[in-house]
Image: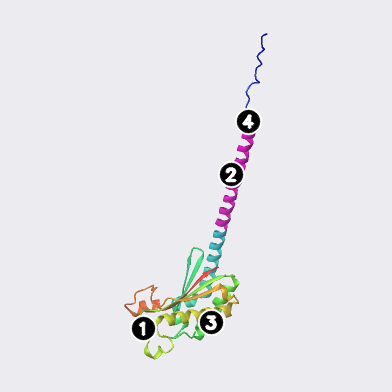
Amino acid sequence: MTRRRTLSPPFSINAWPSFSDALASGLLILVFIITLLSIFSGKVLDEIEERQRATEFEEEMVRQFEQTIERQGMSVEREGSVLRIRLPEQVLFDSGRADIKPDGQEVLRTLGLQLDSFGCDRVLVEGHTDDQPIRETLQSRYETNWELSTGRACRVARFLIEASGLTEESFVASGYAEFHPVATNDDEVGRAENRRIEIVVHP
């Protein structure tokens, strides 16, 4: 008796699962790319907005303090989206002291109102001195330039907090003594430039 040989069904490949997997992977990659682009574009827009606010703040500061800038050497500089306001010692203090002079209080009061109107949430107040040691008659209050620069920065920060209505958490006060000069300490002109308060603002 002869056995009949049966043929196995033709071999076939089901391509649908592979195609669906590839499609799902492609969609995931697309979603990932869109998410990255969204985050990146959001950051770019935020940076543009911050720079614009800083520019507006800089222009307003120059307008408000035009006379102080011209007569007493105050300066306003923008570094990207950050504003740096430099106030020479003569604007705010008598030599070797941290009590703010009446004219300096008026400058800070106006500045505080501007900080408030622009809603600044980060303000760094830096105190700087020249390299001359504290006179003996003043050492009972400020032993070194560290204490003097820090004391001045703290006084300015506290005054701005009261004048602006901004919270204390928005402020940082620090003293750098003579170690961050912007000019030479070899002559009085340079030393006068180094004796200063710098207010770094993030509008």
Please name the amino acid that badge 1 sits on. Answer: Pro
Which residue corresponds to mark 3? 106
Please name the amino acid that badge 2 sits on. Answer: Ile
Q: Are marks 1 and 2 in contact (CB under 8 Å)?
A: no
Distance CA(mark 1)–CA(mark 2):
64 Å
Which residue occupies 37% across, 87% down? Answer: 135
Which residue corresponds to mark 2? 29
Question: Badge 4, how many Cα within 10 Å: few under 14, some, many 20+?
Answer: few
Residue range in magenta is 16-45
Which residue corresponds to mark 1? 133
Q: Are marks 3 and 1 in contact (CB under 8 Å)?
A: no
Distance CA(mark 3)–CA(mark 1):
29 Å
100 magenta-colored: no
Which residue corresponds to mark 4? 15
Distance CA(mark 3)–CA(mark 4):
79 Å
User: Which of 126 and 109 lies nearest the eye of the viewer?
Assistant: 126
Distance CA(mark 2)–CA(mark 3):
58 Å
Q: Which residue is most to the bottom? A: 137
Q: Which residue is most to the top? A: 1
Please name the amino acid that badge 3 sits on. Answer: Glu
User: Which type of secondary structure does the marked residue at label 4 adopt?
Assistant: loop
